[in-house]
């Protein structure tokens, strides 16, 4: 077969798999560890057209341009006038630019509150390193919906603002002058995940890295390498090949051991190997091992930590030892920039602050954060809680909403299941108890366990009042039957009375499980001082932390907490002038990076816990 034929065969395969996925709503399939692959970054300046009326997508009868073959218009054609009489009413070349990765809100003042469509265009040249290679374009994330076109042709659509996606462009990519166009739409929708109502900024755009990824014709698409469930001395691995139609020898090298296995009819090779001398990963010793996988012409390297996480009764066991989760919640935002965090440097700053606080655990709220976070956490020795944006009240009875949530959860787990730092998959935050909601969440738990039965599953649940006793709080959510942890958010002293009330509160739990308080907190404007009863003062927040910790210490099954929150973050729900100014002020660190008094209260407590 000539290389040209090969190219078009791959193009046909790529298009076919796109149609199959579209037709069957197929499971997302991502290239594991794509950032380590050869290719080319597409980060940098992209030309943009702001399109609030979706003029570049729909014709004047509101039919999508990309539904017609060939399309008669649409910005994705990236057209230039053919001659001086030709009418073209847009021009990417002379349009302004935005930097990718990056949200548009913090880059351009007139887009600060914008919710709608922006067209991004990037030109690039790309020649495969040798004939027969396959080429993909990969997006770390685009919030919320992305329609992607290469050289005027639609590659597909991705829905969900915080997980990666990719399209095969083998045979479609040209050596020079490719036009990659993405329509990113961050409009909020009632049936979406999250829905229209959140307490965070709806940053839009190509918020994470974009890259061209190159692989051999047959390649290692996915793998999972970790300790066998319940074992400290055996490694289990599964490698998924792509593009093979006969058994292929797959070799795995880890911790000085090389093993080989043949792939089966589905292109899967499985391994189980003894690793008696393994140093287990922990916050005190975040040991990572080089892992190499080879199959045919393909080879991939990773760094993986090995550890066990389990629950026994009311204890959380890391490598068989009971631990206390000294945590903090954080949003994927760099407060100093007032925009989405996306880089390794951002991850080092945010997680570095968590380390300074004495943490061994971080809750990445309320949606999947960028991949750097889990990799840096692996290195720094921070355990992670990762979460999907099933937040407050979404459409529990809508099958499309459930499918959307499952896809986001699947993409997150597929991306991060080789990270030792990740110990909890969380499927929801503060969702109201009802039959349909519990059924919905149970399906997410099933999805998580089917993809990965080695980590804990949880959700941030709510507390219920006792009508017979105003100071008695009950956690008996029926969904608690399905989770490994009993996690809940509670705001006694802020939304519920004043901090003095904390001394009166008693607790009852419907389950004998480890209790992890996923949120508590109070707003404080950094630098604003008053007495401990003055709202928004650092002293109020400090007092609330002291009293909340004292209350929590009375709970025998208390095994950890992730207070709300590491740093102030932007929220359109927080308008109070001169105090909030569009920021949720519950951070222990202000928007300028300065630590508030409560930071040191929590740090003292964590230092004490660490030395026990
Ligand atoms: C919560 C939510 C969180 C909010 C926080 C607050 O319970 O889970 O997203 O930002 O309270 O500050 O009210």
Image (cartoon, rainbow, N blue to C red):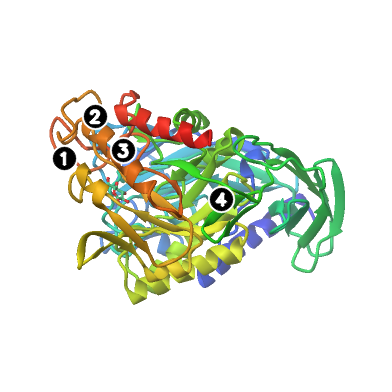
The image quadrant of residue 456 is bottom right
Query: In this image, 333 relative to 523: left or right?
Result: right
Q: Earlier in the sequence, mark 4 or mark 1?
A: 4
In the rendered view, would you say 589 is above or below 383? above
Name the residue tied to disc 4.
423
Q: Earlier in the sequence, mark 2 or mark 1?
A: 2
Residue marked by disc 3: 545
Q: Does the CB distance between marks 1 and 3 fall below 8 Å?
A: no
Q: Residues within 10 Å of mark 2 (few under 14, many from 20)?
A: many
Cα–Cα gap, marks 4 and 1: 36 Å
**What whole-number distance in Å separates the C-alpha atoms at marks 2 and 4?**
33 Å
Q: Which residue is mark 1?
A: 575
Q: Position of residue 266 (x, y in %)?
A: 74, 67
Q: Residue at x 39, y 50 (%)?
A: 518
- Do the numbered discs 4 and 1 sit on residues whose CB atoms are within 8 Å? no
Question: Mark 2 sits on what residue?
Answer: 538
Local crowd size for mark 4, using a 10 Å CA cut-off: few (<14), some (14–19), many (≥20): many
User: Which is closer to the viewer, label 2 or label 4?
Assistant: 2
Spatial separation of the CA atoms under disc 1 and disc 3: 24 Å
Question: Does dot 3 land on a helix, a strand or a loop?
Answer: helix
Alpha carbon separation for disc pair 4 and 3: 26 Å
Counting from the top left corner in percent of width and height, residue 1 is at 80, 56
- Image location (x, y in percent) of residue 420: 62, 45
Is residue 134 or residue 237 the one in the foreground? 237
Q: Tell me if label 2 and label 4 are in contact, CB under 8 Å.
A: no
In the rendered view, tell whether residue 334 sits above or below residue 61.
Answer: above
Give the mark nearest the N terminus, 4 or 3. 4
Q: In terms of image quadrants, where is residue 119?
A: top left
Outermost residue on the left side: it is 577
Q: For the residue carrying disc 3, how many other residues have a C-alpha within 10 Å: few (<14), some (14-19), or many (20+)?
A: many
């Amino acid at each position: 077969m000539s290389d040209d034929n090969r190219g078009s065969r791959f193009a046909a395969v790529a298009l076919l798999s796109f149609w199959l996925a579209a037709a069957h709503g197929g499971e997302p399939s991502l290239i594991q560890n794509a950032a380590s692959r050869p290719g080319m970054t597409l980060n940098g300046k992209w030309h943009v057209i702001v399109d609030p009326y979706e003029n570049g997508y729909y014709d004047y009868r509101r039919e999508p341009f990309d539904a017609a073959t060939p399309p008669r218009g649409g910005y994705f054609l990236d057209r230039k006038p053919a001659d001086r009489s030709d009418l073209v009413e847009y021009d990417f070349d002379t349009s302004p630019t935005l930097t990718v990765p990056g949200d548009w809100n913090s880059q351009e003042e007139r887009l600060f509150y914008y919710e709608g469509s922006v067209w991004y265009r990037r030109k690039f040249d790309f020649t495969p390193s040798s004939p027969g290679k396959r080429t993909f374009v990969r997006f770390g994330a685009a919030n919320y919906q992305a329609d992607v076109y290469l050289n005027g042709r639609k590659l597909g659509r991705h829905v969900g603002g915080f997980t990666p996606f990719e399209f095969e462009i083998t045979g479609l990519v040209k050596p020079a002058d490719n036009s990659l166009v993405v329509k990113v739409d961050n409009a909020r929708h009632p049936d979406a995940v999250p829905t229209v109502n959140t307490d965070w900024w709806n940053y839009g755009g190509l918020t994470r890295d974009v890259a061209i990824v190159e692989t051999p014709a047959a390649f290692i698409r996915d793998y999972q390498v970790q300790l066998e469930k319940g074992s400290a001395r055996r490694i289990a691995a599964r490698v998924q090949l792509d593009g093979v139609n006969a058994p292929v020898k797959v070799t795995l090298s880890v911790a000085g051991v090389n093993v080989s296995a043949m792939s089966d009819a589905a292109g899967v090779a499985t391994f189980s190997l003894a690793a008696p001398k393994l140093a287990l990963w922990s916050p005190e010793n975040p040991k990572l091992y080089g892992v190499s996988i080879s199959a045919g012409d393909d080879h991939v390297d990773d760094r993986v930590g090995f550890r066990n996480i389990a629950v026994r009764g009311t204890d959380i066991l890391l490598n068989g030892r009971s631990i206390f989760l000294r945590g903090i919640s954080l949003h994927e935002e760099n407060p100093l920039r007032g925009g989405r965090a996306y880089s390794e440097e951002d991850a080092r700053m945010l997680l570095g602050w968590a380390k300074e606080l004495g943490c061994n655990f971080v809750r990445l709220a309320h949606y999947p954060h960028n991949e750097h976070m889990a990799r840096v956490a692996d290195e720094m020795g921070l355990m992670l809680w990762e979460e999907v944006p099933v937040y407050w009240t979404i459409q529990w009875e809508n099958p499309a909403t459930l499918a959307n949530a499952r896809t986001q959860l699947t993409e997150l787990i597929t991306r991060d299941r080789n990270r030792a730092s990740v110990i909890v998959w969380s499927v929801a935050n503060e969702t109201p108890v009802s039959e349909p909601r519990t059924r919905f969440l149970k399906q997410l738990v099933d999805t998580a366990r089917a993809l990965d039965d080695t980590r804990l599953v949880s959700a941030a649940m709510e507390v219920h009042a006792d009508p017979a006793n105003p100071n008695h709080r009950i956690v008996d959510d029926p969904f608690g039957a399905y989770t490994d942890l009993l996690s809940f958010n509670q705001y006694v002293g802020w939304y519920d009375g004043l901090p003095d009330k904390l001394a009166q509160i008693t607790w009852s739990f419907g389950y004998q499980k480890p209790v992890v308080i996923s949120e508590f907190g109070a707003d404080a404007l950094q630098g604003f001082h008053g007495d401990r009863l003055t709202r928004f003062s650092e002293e109020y927040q400090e007092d609330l932390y002291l009293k909340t910790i004292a209350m929590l210490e009375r709970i025998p099954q208390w095994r950890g907490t992730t207070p709300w929150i590491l740093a102030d973050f932007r929220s359109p729900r927080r308008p109070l002038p001169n105090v909030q100014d569009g920021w949720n002020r519950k951070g222990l660190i202000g928007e300028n990076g300065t630590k508030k008094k409560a930071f040191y209260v929590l740090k003292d407590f964590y230092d004490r816990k660490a030395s026990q």
